[in-house]
Amino acid sequence: ISYSGACSSGTSSASVGENTITLNTLNDGSYSGCELTVTDVAGNATQLALGNFSIDATPPVLSMEQSIPSFINESSPFLIFSSSEPGIISYSGSCSSSTTQITEGGQHTIALNQLSEGYYHGCSLSVTDSSGNTSTPLSIAPFTIDLTKPSGFSYLTSINTSASQASRYLSAADANGIDSYCISTYSTSPTTSSGCWTTVSSTNNFVKNSTTFSYGAADALYVWYKDAATNI
C-alpha cells in the first residue's frame, strides 16, 4: 500500500478481503485529495480515494464573563459565559436551564430555572461540540437566593428642639445580613441606588442605639433596611 495527499499510515500491505487502515495522526482541519494505492505482486495498481473529511479533536473552551452575585433576590438568576464553539449545554449540580444549545461561539446569557431560597454550590455547565468533544466543566461560583425582606423597627430616643435634631434607636434582623439603612421623610421605599443609604458592617442582627439626624417640625420619618441580597 502507498499513500498520497496529506494522509499516511503505518500499514504498508493488504490482504485479500476487508482491511482496516489507521491513518497516522492528523491535526485538526479539513482534508481532501487523500488516496491509497494497492499494488499486487504482478505490478497491477488500483487507487482508492478516501474522500473529504474533517478532524476536530479540540473541545470547546469556556470562560465565565459574569457570574451570579453571592447574594441575589431573584429565583431565576442569570450568568454570562463565553464558548469558543457552538454545541449542546449540559448542567450539573442543583442548577439547570431551558437553554440547552448554543448555535455559535462567543458570549451567551443563561437564565437558570427557578430555584427556592437557599445556598447553592457545586453547579457547573459543559458544552459538547458537533464532533462529540466536551469542554472542561465551567464552575458556577456558590450563591445564595434570598427573597425575604429584613425585619426591623426604630423609635425616637431624644429630641433637641432648639437644634432641630433628634435621635433614633435602630434595630433590624436578616438571615443573610443587614448591610445598610436609610432614614427618609418619604413614605415610598427607596431604590437600592438612592443616596440615603448608610452602609454598615454586615450583620444578622443590627442595632444602633443612637442615630442623630436633622428634622423639620412637620416631618414624618421612615426607616428602611437593606440586606445583602438588596431586599428592602
Image (tube, grey):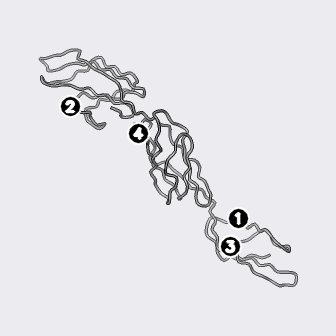
- Point out the tag, 2 or 3, that comes first from the N-terminus: 3
Q: In this rendering, which labeled residue sits more in front, label 4 or label 3?
A: 4
Query: Left or right of 203: which side holds 81?
Result: right
Most foreground residue, 85 or 24:
85
Q: Amino acid at mark 2?
A: Tyr
Query: Left or right of 84: which side holds 181?
Result: left
Instruction: Give the structural element (helix, strand or loop) at label 3.
Output: loop
Instruction: Give the structural element (helix, strand or loop) at label 1.
Output: loop
Q: Which residue is mark 4?
A: 74
The picture places residue 184, in percent across and down from the top left corner, at 22, 29
Q: Which residue is mark 3?
A: 6
Q: CA distance from mark 4 to mark 3?
A: 55 Å
Give the vertical position of 21 relative to 128 (above or below). Answer: below
- Disc number for residue 25: 1
Give the vertical position of 135 relative to 153 (above or below). Answer: below
**Mark 4–mark 3 CB contact (< 8 Å):** no
- Point out the tag, 4 or 1, that comes first from the N-terminus: 1
Q: Amino acid at mark 3?
A: Ala
Extreme residue toward the top, this view: 158
Instruction: Give the structural element (helix, strand or loop) at label 2.
Output: loop
Mark 1, Cα crowd under 10 Å, few <14 / some 14-19 / many 20+, is: few
Q: Which residue is mark 2?
A: 186
Specify the quadrant of the image occupied by residue 23.
bottom right
- Point out the tag, 4 or 3, that comes first from the N-terminus: 3
Q: CA distance from mark 4 to mark 1?
A: 50 Å
Specify the quadrant of the image occupied by residue 45.
bottom right
Quadrant placement of the C terminus: top left
Quadrant placement of the N terminus: bottom right
Q: Residue at x 40, y 24 (%)?
A: 204
Q: CA distance from mark 2 to mark 3?
A: 77 Å
Most foreground residue, 160 or 17:
17
